[in-house]
């Protein structure tokens, strides 16, 4: 089974360059709507049997375009929303962005007990996201492919935690653009293999 992890299209918070992680969050911009349509065209020929999205508005709007192209319904699930910014929410200053990134770096080094300032710990993020992916795998193990529209930060973490092919430094440094896709494939004996990462060779 292939799992297409898709980052949502451009949101209004992306344009403002602020940390906006609270649910339901901002909507897509006009450019974001166009990006979502382009994504739908890109994946419309893939054997995707289900389209999932986080509880964030921007993820659901992105997923709606893809689901429409595939004549499917968007299924909204828990656990795959963005890493909460905590006390850094709605900030875009250098100090806040560095603190947010430093927490990701700590988690990718294995320091999952570290918490985002005023926010969730790495072990909580790992448990909720990987738990959701495990549920999807159990449901679709025999299907060819599914798509999950999620969030750049959470996707980078999840892909590194799920696949031995993803180097922690890659996950830390190689950010995922709007509508970027991380392609994973489940292994017969368990686990996942990373087939593609935007802008990088796996």
Image (cartoon, rainbow, N blue to C red):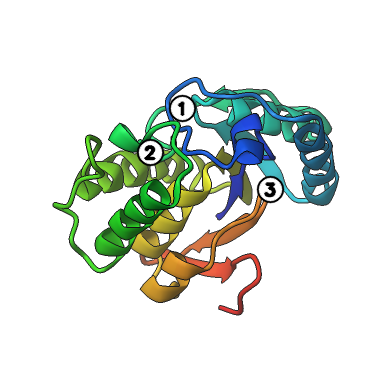
Q: Which residue is mark 1?
A: 77
Vertical placement of residue 11 versus 38, above or below:
above
N-terminal of the pair, mark 2 or mark 3, is 2
* Cα gap from disc 2 to disc 3, whole angstroms: 20 Å
| Occupied quadrant, residue 195 | bottom right
**102 and 71: which is toward the camera:** 102
Badge 1 marks a residue whose secondary structure is loop
Which SS class for mark 3? Answer: loop
Residue picked out by circle 3: 179
Q: Residue furthest top?
A: 24
Tell whether 137 sits left or right of 121: right
* Figure check: 73 above or below 119: above
- Residue at the left extreme of this rendering: 113
- Judged by depth in the image, the label closer to the viewer, 3 or 1, is 3
Disc on the earlier residue, 2 or 1: 1
Q: Position of residue 140 (x, y in %)?
A: 51, 42
């Amino acid at each position: 089974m292939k799992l297409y992890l898709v980052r949502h299209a451009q949101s209004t918070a992306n344009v403002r360059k602020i940390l906006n992680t609270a649910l339901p969050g901002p909507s897509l911009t006009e450019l974001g709507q166009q990006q979502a349509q382009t994504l739908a065209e890109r994946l419309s020929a893939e054997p995707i049997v289900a389209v999932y999205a986080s509880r964030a508005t921007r993820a659901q709007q992105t997923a709606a375009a893809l689901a429409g192209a595939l004549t499917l319904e968007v299924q909204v699930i828990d656990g795959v929303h963005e890493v909460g910014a905590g006390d850094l929410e709605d900030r875009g200053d250098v100090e806040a962005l560095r603190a947010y990134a430093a927490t990701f770096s700590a988690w990718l080094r294995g320091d999952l007990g570290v918490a985002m300032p005023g926010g969730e710990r790495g072990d909580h993020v790992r448990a909720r996201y990987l738990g959701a992916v495990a549920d999807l795998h159990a449901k679709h193990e025999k299907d060819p492919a599914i798509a999950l529209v999620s969030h750049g930060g959470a996707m980078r973490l999840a892909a590194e935690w799920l696949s031995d092919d993803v180097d922690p430094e890659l996950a830390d440094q190689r950010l995922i653009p709007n509508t970027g896709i991380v392609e994973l494939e489940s292994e017969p004996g368990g686990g996942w293999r990373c087939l593609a990462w935007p802008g990088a060779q796996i």
